[in-house]
């Protein structure tokens, strides 16, 4: 098998506002875990984030970027 057979297209998708990223794969994973676990602590544990303030920090940055409070 040649290395050309191993080449395939790939894309990454994220949301931007004013040229600054708001939400990418990591943020989507955080929001999904919060929705499914219904708890920041359990979401952090599920994602391997040992401190839930990491999630709070991410959510605060996202909220500021969109200019509105996030409703979770």
Image (spheres, rainbow, N blue to C red):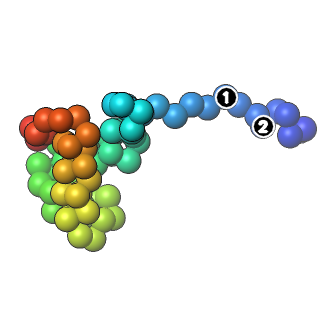
- Residue 2 versus residue 55: which sits nearer the camera? 55
Quarter of the rendering containing residue 18 = top left
Q: Is residue 19 left or right of residue 51?
A: right
Seen in the image, is 14 located left or right of residue 71? right
Q: Quadrant of residue 68?
A: top left
List the single residue furthest toward the bottom.
50
The residue beneath circle 2 is: 6
The answer to which of 67 and 13 lies nearer the viewer is 67
Visible residue check, residue 31: no
Q: Position of residue 37 (x, y in %)?
A: 16, 50
Q: Secondary structure at mark 2?
A: helix
- Residue at x 33%, y 64% (from the top left corner): 48
Q: Residue at x 32, y 45 (%)?
A: 27
- Residue 9: give its label: 1
When the figure is inspected, residue 24 is found, relative to residue 60, above or below; the finding is above
Q: CA distance from mark 2 to mark 1?
A: 10 Å
């Amino acid at each position: 098998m040649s290395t050309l057979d191993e080449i395939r297209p790939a894309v990454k998708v994220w949301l931007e506002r004013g040229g600054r990223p708001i939400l990418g794969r990591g943020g989507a994973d955080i929001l999904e875990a919060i929705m499914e676990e219904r708890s920041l602590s359990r979401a952090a544990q599920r994602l391997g984030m040992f401190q839930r303030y990491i999630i709070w920090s991410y959510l605060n940055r996202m909220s500021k970027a969109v200019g509105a409070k996030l409703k979770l």
